């Protein structure tokens, strides 16, 4: 669902100093994200709290999923 709402699946985004600022900037650039539930992964690790970013990380927006 996320991929269908965004104009492309991969893109470069301006540096943000932490994950919270990144989420806010993504919400401004892609307002549709504000109404969607998703998880944030940084360098293939799920992020639950605000973390500092260096600027060269791979960021992924993951749709909700149930696991076992």
Image (tube, grey):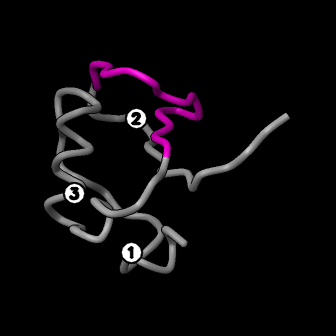
Give the labeled residue for mark 3: 27
Quarter of the C terminus within the rendering? top right
Q: Position of residue 65 (x, y in %)?
A: 68, 49
Answer with mark 3 or mark 2, whichever residue precedes in sequence. 3
Nearest the viewer among 57 and 29 is 29
Element on which disc 3 rests: helix
Q: Residue at x 51, y 72 (%)?
A: 3
Q: Position of residue 57 (x, y in %)?
A: 40, 35
Labels in figure, total: 3
The reply to whether callout 1 and callout 2 are in contact (CB within 8 Å) is no
Quarter of the N terminus within the rendering? bottom right
Query: Crowding at label 2, few (<14), some or many (≥20) Cα neighbours within 10 Å?
Result: few
Give the labeled residue for mark 1: 6
Q: Which residue range is magenta in the image?
A: 39-53
> Relative to 46, is 62 above or below?
below
Q: Is residue 66 left or right of residue 60?
A: right
Q: Residue at x 17, y 36 (%)?
A: 21
Give the labeled residue for mark 2: 57
Is residue 50 on the magenta stretch?
Answer: yes
Answer with mark 3 or mark 1, whichever residue precedes in sequence. 1
């Amino acid at each position: 669902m996320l991929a269908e709402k965004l104009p492309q699946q991969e893109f470069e985004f301006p540096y943000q100093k932490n994950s919270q600022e990144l989420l806010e900037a993504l919400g401004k650039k892609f307002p549709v994200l504000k109404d969607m539930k998703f998880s944030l992964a940084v360098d293939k690790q799920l992020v639950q709290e605000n973390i500092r970013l260096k600027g060269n990380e791979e960021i992924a927006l993951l749709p909700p999923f149930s696991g076992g």
